Amino acid sequence: MSRTRTALLAAMALVAGATGTAFAVDPGGADVAAVPCTVDYKIQNQWSTGFTAAVTITNNSAAKSSWSLKWSYAGNQKVTSGWNAKLSQSGAAVTAANETYNAQLATGGSVSFGFQGSYSGSNAIPATFTLDGVTCNVDDGGPGGPTDPPDPGGPANRVNNPYEGAKVYVNPEWSANAAAEPGGSRVANQPTGVWLDRIAAINGAGGKMGLRAHLDEALRQKGSGELVVQFVIYNLPGRDCSALASNGELKADEIGRYKTDYIDPIKAILADPKYSSLRIVTTVEIDSLPNLVTNTGSRPTAVPQCDVMKANGNYVKGVGYALNKLGDVPNVYNYVDAGHHGWIGWDDNFGPTATIMKEAATAEGATVNDVHGFITNTANYSALKENNFTINDTVAGKSVRESKWVDWNRYLDELSYAQAFRNQLVSAGFNSNIGMLIDTSRNGWGGAARPTGPGATTSVDTYVDGGRYDRRFNAGNWCNQSGAGLGERPQAAPAAGIDAYVWMKPPGESDGSSKAIPNDEGKGFDRMCDPTYTGNPRNNNNMSGALPDAPVSGHWFSAQFRQLMQNAYPPLS
């Protein structure tokens, strides 16, 4: 070893001794012994009463099958929530222990976690960290430490509407499918949701991009501005108890796997500090909670599997757990699925659905503060606005509500329903600043069949049927609907109480197969996707209205995509 390097290391050891950082120097001239571990502790954002911090541990000793990091604060800092580690605090002493999914820590390997805390006065970085009882050296992270000014637009301070002033992520895989269709380049640059509909989708399945790959691409698309990236969290145990086409991989009682194998790994990735500059919007578990209201008990629409899910509580527990864990990540915005007007718009569904959503939002450690808003019409076809008649119209002595199409519903379309349901949710105990999203990916109903005015006043049915944009046989029809078109293009703050119109369901991805198709995705066959099916109580025993020759749900359905473009409203240029 050269004299210069020996002197340098000796100087480093002297400095380290003054700062609590341990280096070992061999006076006989041997190489420096590696420190057993290093801890990189960075304060990412700091404001007058709180802060967020990111911690990375690097293990330079023998591989570990579990780990526990400890430190003490010199001030009054308190850890209030965390992610990617089990955090506990007693007085000034804090312990961060591994989660099940990040327990392995190889020699030379690293693991990261983060947390949010409160403080007053100073917020000094801890002087000493111990990993499994052994003292590590400390890296205060340099720039980005506690002396930096707080970032008022940073992830620790969620904006009221994440879509305002931001671009939205374009999924390159969906974009390529769209662009490959004749005329598809007209919409291939539109942002769509990314569906995490099974555990394998987290890392990427069937050659598709995984969650990290999408987030990395989102960072590339972001550039220097703000960017929203949208994910659908969709893998509850006993998923979608009333629709076989969207059944999932987890059995009704596998709430443990849902937590440890699905939500926890998603949270671990979303909480990576690398992605803290993104605005991450989640649509949480579509078609789940409303089923517990409308498809259980003695109702004619009841389904035995929905009774099972209501009895075991795993929809409520699963949604609560997802909201709690994902809500801990400061730049995640959770939007809970709230059905659609043709499902929840009746009096006996409206209030009870808001109530059960409040129950779920306060289960498994979640609070209403973990809910940024709600989304309606996800993967559905309900028209955004019916302009040719109102709910208060009377024709031939009968109210519009008495027509076969409306069937005593209080709402005709998604915009009126979303705005009214928002008020109901606030009354149920959610925060008054919640925002709504409306999925407009397939509710345009344009083309030659689009009415230009009200129907004939011969009867209330001719009046409504002749004037309605939504051409389905019944508003309960949900699978690959014939005649549907692309709706309003994604846009921020389009109406009062609405954060955005979004394309959360990627247009052209099937709702379910027209006949039974074996698959390894846990997806069954539902007769509502069969064009010959004559219906059930959930669609008033109408024909299904489904397109023929459809593939398994989530797979590309070229004929549907071409129809959606043809019937787009506003029309495509």
Image (spheres, helix red, strand yellow):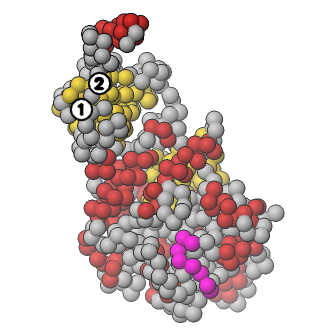
Left or right, 3 with reference to 472: left
Helix, strand or loop status at disc 1: strand
Measuring from the top left, give residue 389's x and y in whole percent.
67, 74
Mark 1 closeness class: few <14, some 14–19, many ≥20 residues within 10 Å: many
183 left or right of 83 in image: right
Q: What span is colored magenta in the figure?
A: 548-555
Name the amino acid, label 2: Val
Question: Closer to the camera: disc 2 or disc 1?
Answer: 2
In this view, 356 is above or below 513: above
Q: Residue at horizontal 76%, vertical 61%? A: 186
Q: Which residue shows up at 36% across the image and 27% down it?
A: 41
Q: Earlier in the sequence, mark 2 or mark 1?
A: 2
Q: Position of residue 459 (x, y in %)?
A: 66, 89
Look at the image and say whether residue 554 sits in the magenta stretch. Answer: yes
Q: Does residue 155 appear left or right of residue 396 in this picture? A: left
Q: Is residue 470 above or below residue 203?
A: below
* Front in this rendered view, residue 245 or 260: 260
- Dividing the picture into quadrants, the one containing residue 251 is bottom left
The numbered disc on residue 351 is: none
Residue that mark 2 sits on: 35
- The residue pinned by badge 1 equals 131
Quarter holding the C terminus?
bottom right
Estimate the spatial distance between the alpha carbons at disc 2 and disc 1, rounded to whole Å: 12 Å
Foreground residue among 178 and 437: 178
Q: Is residue 254 above or below residue 267?
A: below
Please tell me which residue is depicted at 53% across the width and 74% down the height of the picture.
Answer: 553
Q: Look at the picture and state if 298 lies above or below 175.
A: below
For mark 2, give the secondary structure. loop
Q: Residues within 10 Å of mark 2 (few under 14, many from 20)?
A: some
- In x, y percent, where is residue 357? 38, 61
Q: How many marks?
A: 2
| 34 magenta-colored | no
